[in-house]
Amino acid sequence: MTFILALHILLVLSFTIRILLRDDLSPPVRLAWFIVLNVLPYVGIAIYFLFGETDLGHRADKRHKEIFDEIHENASQFMGAPADVDHLIDPEYRNGFHYAGSINGFYPIAGNNATLMEDATATRESMIADIDAAQEYVHVLYYIWLDDYTGTALANALIRAAQRGVQCRAMADGLGSHKFIKSQLWKRMSEAGVQLAVALPINKPVRTLLTSRLDLRNHRKITIIDGKVTYCGSRNSADPEFLVKAKYAPWVDIMLRLTGPIVTQNQLLFISDWMQATDERIDDFELKAEPAEEGFPAQVMGDGPTERKGATPQLFACLIATARFELTLSTPYFVPDETVLEALRAAAYRGVKVTLIFPKINDSWIVAAASRSHYFKLLEAGCDLFEFKGGLLHAKTLTMDKKITLIGSSNLDLRSFDLNYENNILLQDKAITQAVFGRQQQYLQSSEQVRFETVSNWPYLQRIKNNIIATVSPIL
């Protein structure tokens, strides 16, 4: 008995000291770990061992730095420069663009154009048409790739392109697309000449658990055709019916089709992932940029566990702080840290019309509860809050002052902030921002407003549940 007690104290004390030694943890995260370790010590120790460290390992960090050093050395002319922010972006919004550029070196470049895709069908048809017209290369990367109608159509388009001599590279996340990677369709792509790679593979789970964690994922959605066209938004390579979670369907997504030098920046982000997975060099890729005579400034922002911690929430906070009169934001998963939460409240308090759109029914009850724990504070500050009822709203959008748009794969949750590789595009343009804002208004038409009085009168048990989950949400 004495030995067991001593072992118990040693284990809890060891993990407690480890948590206290970590300078990268915020006080709320550290407190959440203390609570779990003391309430459920053995479960907490196991969870910390499996998921406590948001680190891919020294080797991955070193390789990431080498890759971006190589990209900066060989492709800096496509990445823009800090001076371009002051030249291209209106003064009141420059801080946000400067901060975005500080993450991985992509700054705004002019001469871009975009089209907002009408729906899932239009996105699929446009993408397949672009791939069928490709003459040089096609590069795709998806977190989730299913063998449904959309996923099969994309795979077949790549097969056709490869068979006519177009260089095709396709990458899928090892966890999000684990079934597809083992499918006959994936095999057919390889046999047709499509070069394949798996982002963050899970074929060696024990090694992954010992050196990293299984839930560090590549959440990006990137498509590039001939260096002329790219797509950016929230849609995976899957039908809106999303058969793996059909009861929450339809998945409501948003995608932009973009042309101009922003394509090359997105290409470089894809290249960074491809090099990490395959050890190819940047010399193996053709890089070019084709700016239009007229077009808006835009820049890519890619984040992930090998970038500096806190980059994404700090970017959102910077952007929110520059809003002058209106900010509209949609996200399926809203579990922010204090940086983002207080930035939203501060914007509302200073008179900005802050409109937030979340799904009414979420595929994660834990996320839904943690999200609703913040409703009182948001509504108290004057934010307008809506819950979408027409399926699972999966679109990640931010529009500001009818002029600034951020669109891509990043959710406003701790997973996107700390664990996932994400890709986004930040742009300044009245026309495309008006189009995205118009889509947000369509979301609002299928939503019901959440009133302060309603939240104030939620049953005690519901509020307790939400707040308990929110307390440990930093480690979920």
Image (spheres, grey):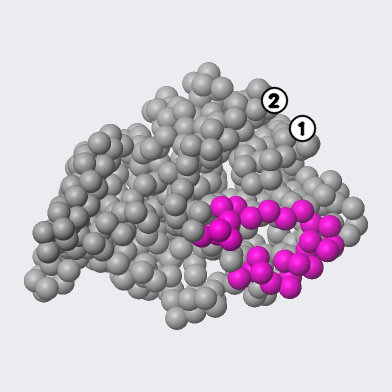
Q: Is residue 199 magenta?
A: yes
In this orientation, which residue lies closer to the viewer: 449 or 231? 231
Q: Label 2 is placed on what type of residue? A: Asn
Q: Label 1 is placed on what type of residue? A: Asp
Q: Position of residue 191 (x, y in %)?
A: 83, 63
182 lies left or right of 12? right
Identify the residue under disc 1. Answer: 283
Q: Earlier in the sequence, mark 1 or mark 2?
A: 2
- Badge 2 crowding class, 10 Å Cα cut-off, few under 14, some 14 to 19, many 20 or more, is few
359 lies left or right of 278? left
225 lies left or right of 44? right
Give me the residue at 51% from left, 60% from top.
Answer: 205
Asked if residue 452 can be seen in this view, the reply is no
- Image quadrant for the N terminus? bottom left
Q: Position of residue 345 (x, y in %)?
A: 22, 45
Q: Secondary structure at mark 2?
A: helix
How much space separates mark 1 and mark 2, taking CA atoms?
8 Å
Q: Are marks 1 and 2 in contact (CB under 8 Å)?
A: yes
Identify the residue under disc 2. Answer: 74
In this orientation, which residue lies closer to the viewer: 307 or 215? 215
Asked if residue 61 can be seen in this view, the reply is yes
Give me the residue at 34% from left, 54% from top.
Answer: 49
Instruction: Relative to 246, say whether 205 is above or below.
Output: above
In this orientation, which residue lies closer to the viewer: 68 or 44? 44
Q: Which residues are the magenta region?
A: 179-205
Give me the residue at 25% from left, 59% from top.
Answer: 44
